[in-house]
Amino acid sequence: MIALKLIVAVIQDKDSNLLQQALVDADFHATKLASTGGFLRSGNTTFIIGTEDHQVEDLLELIREHCHSRNQVISPISSLDANTDGYMMHPVEVEVGGATVFVLDVDQFKHF
C-alpha cells in the first residue's frame, strides 16, 4: 500500500499564480481555494495537494521557493464611536506572506 499525505498550504494571494504554475510543471495535482484569514483579514489562497510520502520534501521545497514573506503597511484601526483608547492611530509595517503548511496522514483515498 502506498503511503499518502495531504498537504494544506495557505499562502498569500500574490504568490498563488506562480505556485500554481510550479505545481503544474512539477506534475503535482492541487485544488485551489480562495480563503480569508489572519489578523489582517486579507485574501489568501489555500492549496490542497495529495501526494505520495516520498514526494513531500520536494513539494515543501517548491512551496518554499515560490511563497515569500514581504513587508506591508497596514492602516490604523478606526473606532465607530470615536473612542480611540487602545487603538493604533498610525500606519504600522508588518511582515506578511510566506506559507503556512499542514502535512497530514491520509488513511484512505477514494476517487469516483
Image (tube, rainbow, N blue to C red):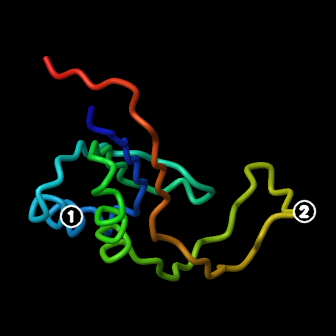
Residue 63's tag is none
Instruction: Please provide percent x and percent y for residue 4.
Output: 32, 40
Residue that sits furthest to the right in the current view: 85
Q: Is residue 24 left or right of residue 38?
A: left
Q: Give the crowd class for mark 1: few <14, some 14-19, many >=20 residues within 10 Å.
A: few
- The residue closer to the viewer here, 99 or 45, is 99
In the image, is residue 49 above or below residue 16?
above
Instruction: Please provide percent x and percent y for residue 11.
Output: 40, 60
Residue that sits furthest to the top in the current view: 112
Residue on which the image places disc 2? 85
Among the two numbered marks 2 and 1 on one chain, the one whose residue lies closer to the N terminus: 1
Q: Which mark is in front, 2 or 1?
A: 1
**Label 1 sits on what residue type?**
Asn
Residue on which the image places disc 1? 17
In which quadrant of the rendered view does residue 26 lie?
bottom left
In which quadrant of the rendered view does residue 43 lie?
bottom left
Describe the element under mark 1 as helix, strand or loop. helix
- The residue closer to the viewer here, 99 or 78, is 99
Instruction: Please provide percent x and percent y for residue 78.
Output: 70, 60
- The residue closer to the viewer here, 35 or 104, is 104
The C terminus: image quadrant: top left
Instruction: Please provide percent x and percent y for residue 102.
Output: 48, 50
